[in-house]
Every structure is written in structure tokens, then in C-alpha cells.
Amino acid sequence: MTERLSILIITYNREEDTLELLKSLKTQVDYDLYIGEVLLLNNASTVSYDRLKAYIAEHPEMNIRYIEHTENLGVARGRNYLIQEAKYPLLLVLDDDVVFDDVNGIRNAACTFNEPLFAQNNTAIVSFCVFYYDTLERQKNAFPHKKQSKYIGRQQFLTSYFIGGAHLVRRALFNEIGLYPTTFFYGTEEYDLGFRILNAGYTIGYSEAVKVLHKESPLGRVTNSEKQAMLWYNKSTVAWKYLPKKYFYTTAVLWSLLVLKKTGFDLKTWFKTWPKIMRIPKNQPRTPISKEALSYIDAVEGRLWY
């Protein structure tokens, strides 16, 4: 039996992209059968959303609830807000700058947890495949496995983490393991939630049954140096919280080198971030995942070193 979806979207300064996403949703097969509601959070945008609001008013049949927040909550807090507002058992989380590749995306998403691989392995969250909007090439940094040459091409598999841009999750999961960590404004919040999912005895999956096209718009994002520093800090924090201590040190060091590479050797940001990294053990309590969860990560060939 297929359950209905709450679709969760956070937007910031991307009216045109978000409007195109809503129009893409409108074309989906059996919209009323699979979609219970669309929750759209405007994260305190500084540009007009009048055209989008007019579109929503013209299409009450889409059951879109548009929420304007006075504060930019970021990704984690924004998702937490929408999760608590959602009414339906399955949550389909989408970035505001994606569109569906075909009209069967929603129907396929709603049926995902009925797939034998996911039903038999207690899967709680599934990422979908992401391609670039302009080139139609696969977005490899949105593929949830580090051994890409081995796993790209598989229609579905179990993995150790998920990608936030297009994923399906059971709403009841959050009643059991809690919401996203609110200390993360941007980046790696999926890793934190993913480790808690695995520690609770669930698995994480990937499916090619749903394909979205991602514009990867630069609007509304922080600078590249700020972004890389956030990812480095957050990834190190997650490693300290959930993994054996050796992985914190390898993550901190290897990500520091990656940040240098990706920022064109922005030494100012690098030196500014290192003291924050070194304070993580003092400021962040550890809640290591179980041996069973670590064994699962090993079984699905997940990467722990960084």
C-alpha cells in the first residue's frame, strides 16, 4: 500500500527556480493520489516572491502551504521546522533548484519503500539520483557512495549516508531518533542524521527510480571559502561525535588539505578554522555509534577516514 507524501522545500532568494519546481510538480502523474501537501518555507529571502505567491493562489488544488519566516533558519533548522509541520507519513525533501526529469517521479518516490531491497532491510531514508540541469551529466558529488566507479549504474543499493537535495524519509523516524542538529547552519547535517539512523538499527538506501535535474544556483549561498570551512568543521564535528577517535584526527587533517585545494590556498580561512577544529574535543560530547552500525558501514563499503 502506497502512503501519501508531504513535500518539504526550503527556499532563499530563488523565486524563479522555486516556481519552476512547483510547475514541475504540477505535471506529475496522479498528483492528488500521491501528494498530500507541499510545505514551502521561505527562509527570510531578501527578494520578491510575488510571482510565486500568485502561482500558488492560482492553483489551490496543489495544496501548497507557503510560509514566510522572519529569520534565515539555515538548512537543518529549516528542515526541522517543516518536519514538525508535516502531516503525512512520508516526507519527500527537495532543494528549491531542482526539477523532475519526467512525470512519473512522484509516483516512483511514493512507492520506494515497497521495493524488496528497502522493505527487507529496514530502510528509513533513500536518496534519489541527481543530474545537472544544464548538461544532463550526473552530479557525482550528489551520489551517495565514495566508490563511484563500482556503484554508478546500479538501480538501487544500500549505503552509509544520504544526500539532502532529493530524498525520501519516514516521518516517524524523527520521533525515534530526533531532528537535525541545530548547530549546523550549512553542510553535513545529513551525515549527523545518517549516523543516528544507522545506530538505531535502520539502513540507508539509494534509488535511481526518481531522477531530478539540479541547477546548482549560486544564489543564496555563502562564499566558497566560507562553505568549505563550514564543511571541514562540521565533518570533523560529526566524526568526533559518532566515530572512533582516530577518524576524527584523520578527518580533520585530510579535510584541511581538501579545503586548501578547493579554496585556492586561502590561508586566512585555513588558519582561522584550525583553532575551531582543535576545540571540538573539548566542546563536543561524544556519542559513538554501535559496533553493529560500524559493521554495517563496512559491509556497504562506506568510507570512515574522511
Image: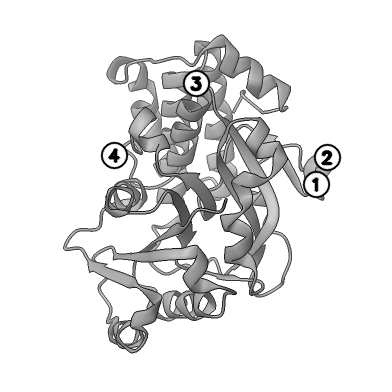
Label 4 amino acid? Thr
Q: Are marks 1 and 4 in contact (CB under 8 Å)?
A: no
**Where is 18 relative to 169, above or below?**
below
Q: Left or right? Give the position of 165 relative to 138.
A: left
Q: Secondary structure at mark 3?
A: helix
Label 2 amino acid? Lys
**Where is 15 relative to 249, above or below?**
below
Q: Dot 1: within a 10 Å radius of its alpha carbon, few (fewer than 14), some, or many (20 or more) residues?
A: few
Q: Are marks 4 and 3 in contact (CB under 8 Å)?
A: no
The residue identified by callout 3 is: 199
Which one is closest to the eye, mark 1 or mark 2?
A: 1
Identify the mark nearer the N-term, 4 or 2.
2
Q: Dot 3: within a 10 Å radius of its alpha carbon, few (fewer than 14), some, or many (20 or more) residues?
A: many
Identify the mark nearer the N-term, 1 or 4.
1
The residue identified by callout 2 is: 150
Work out how far the residue at label 2 is from the one at label 3, CA to CA, in angstroms: 26 Å
The residue identified by callout 1 is: 154
| Residue in the picture at 38% in, 78% down | 15
Label 3 amino acid? Asn
Q: Quadrant of the C terminus?
A: top right
Residue 253 in percent (x, y) is at 54, 25
